[in-house]
Image: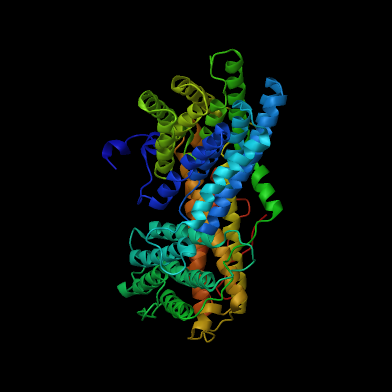
Amino acid sequence: MSRSELSLPPWITHALRAQRGPVPWAAVGRGALAAGPVLVSGMAVGRTALGVLAAIGAMLAGINDRPGSRRASVKRLGVPALAGAVGLVVGTAAGERVPPLALTVLLTGLGLVAGCVSAVGPVASAAGTQVLVAAALGAGMPVPEPGWARALAFLAGAAWLLALRLALPTPGALAGDFRFDGERAAVADVYDAIARLLDAVGTADARTRRFALTAALDHAQDALTGPRLRRWASSAAERRLHAQYAAALPLAEAATALAWAGDPVPARAAEGPRRLAAAVRDHAPTGPLPAPSRDAPGLRALDDALLHAAHTFDRDGAHRDLHTRRRTVRGLLHTAFGPGGREYGLRVALSFGAGAGTAQALHHSHWYGQHAHWYWMPATAVFLVKPDLGPLVSRVLCRAAGTVLGALLFAAFAAVLPRPEGLVVLVAVCGALVPVATRHFAAQTAVVTVLVLALVMVGGEPQASVSRIAETLLACLIVLIAGHLPLPGRRGGQVRARLAAAGEAAGAYLRHVLDGSDSHGGSSSHRGSGPADARHGAGGPDDRATRWTLRREAYRALAEARTAIALAAAELPALARHSAGTDEVAVLLERLVDTTTACAVHLDDTGRLTPHLTERLAEVLDELAARGERVGDHVPRSHPAKPPAGPPSHSTRIHTGA
């Protein structure tokens, strides 16, 4: 990053930042085979309008076609597609039967519900986006086909891309059973992340490497926990991957404890996890693993975890526990309709409703001239109000720039390409570019703009580049106003909700570790030397499994909170000030969870806490309490209280305040 870029405000630098990484050639191939072919199929049977809708369904599914496992892609692509089909039916029925004012009210209410539900998670957010975009298409793009036929065409396009995702192998990942290449790559990345964290122990890079380990574990967990027909993994290859993932958890725990201690470790400590990563990736035996020294609790835990991993890798996996807990209906409703969900829902409702109302007013005043479609403005507002894509001003700048570029490019293509053959080729090319363009919102907008303009021209609409630019700029203005309007309740609800969830998860993890210390006793004679002891721990297999589940939840919640805080900090100062101080609270919670992990490893090793560990716990809890007095509701109300004074022992406990 250049010095001039560093001097720019965050809301500008975020707009200039793009994701990096290798080109996802498999996704590029799927994109080329998705929208174009389904459009040709519709044209071949004389149903061009349905072919256009099928291509739109494939395009939206392509935007959600991210790296991961095949099993996870079923939910990631399928759930939003189903939501989009429902939106098409609702939008079509409302557009045909409801007058403009009532239609605007109906779409505003739909935006409120979809916005609230979007706060639940990434898949719910994608579903909320597609239901609103599809509702705008159904109401604002009149075609002769009934709503159910439109919905089936939309689903067919998305289902075609999903079928390609499930059937085609990933290049370069054909070792073993190719059905699980995404899962295998995700589990191997966990072991690589552990090795990189061990390499960085005692350096300034340790914290960043620990973040990367959390991200790798989250990704692997998501890859392995996708929908299935049976409750448990049914094939030996999948069971083996589950067991290899579970074997990485004690290694990650030991590596985190070593990073917390900060004492450099021998270079050979990282060699074992690195060889395990290669074994997972190549579907091959591990070979001999170098044993680390055993002169510290973290190193002894690392050695035991390596022994357990070697034992697991040498036999057919039978491990079923992925250390996740189902989210309850009550918890989902609280997330959706709590302060964070309500705030986002109101913003979406205002933006989507105002976009739909303005578009209809311009449409009925004949500003559109011969263009009969008014869906562009509300659909644009949906993408603009979506916080997953970056801070508000960054999204607006990227959307405006991308639309202008895409519209100008399409105008140039439309002037020279033969119709409809040239436009169909353009659709196929843009479909292939979507997976690459998702790295930057402006690039994605430009590609999608060209693709959609080509589709609607194939469907019979005249060239509409100029009007689309004007509608996009109006949508940008609407969302900017809606994003800065004062609303009931305190601003920054989404950040505070994520931070509160992180605090509750950290408290649950800490309580379990210290409450479970009673079962360890005050002697260190309980330790064994075999893989079974490393797997079960002193508290037994159930205690260790629960601890890993709580640890995973704590680190995942912290990662989600950090993401929300980073986005809020990159807003304009008028919005960023509402989340001031939350980054410091997140750092304290990270220190608390890291210290808890160190306590867990030490309790496994000796059965009691040292004065140093107790002092570190008391220090971070005191800082959390002091920070709570300064920033109020940014600190979770249920953060753990200070451990009681006195000499540290196995009976030391802390409790969660009300």
Q: How is the image coloured?
A: rainbow
- Quarter of the C terminus within the rendering: bottom right
Q: Quadrant of residue 193?
A: bottom left
Q: Nearer the viewer, residue 106 or 487?
A: 106
Q: Nearer the viewer, residue 341 or 587?
A: 341
On the image, the x and y values in percent for residue 547 come to 57, 69
322 relative to 415 in the view: left or right = right
For the question of whether residue 405 can be seen, the reply is yes
| 169, 285: nearer the viewer | 169
Q: Is residue 190 left or right of residue 8?
A: right
Q: Position of residue 640 (x, y in %)?
A: 60, 59
The outermost residue toward the front is 45
* Residue in the image at 41% along x and 63% along y: 189
Left or right of 146 in this view: 32: left
Q: How many marks?
A: 0
**Is 252 above or below relative to 555?**
below
In the rendered view, tell whether residue 173 sits above or below residue 398. Answer: below
Taking the image as drawn, is residue 589 in sight? Answer: no
Where does the image place residue 252, in percent across and percent down from the top left?
46, 68
Q: Could you tell me residue 530's position as x and y percent?
A: 49, 85
Quarter occupied by the N terminus: top left
Taking the view exactly as shown, the residue that stands out farthest to the left is: 3
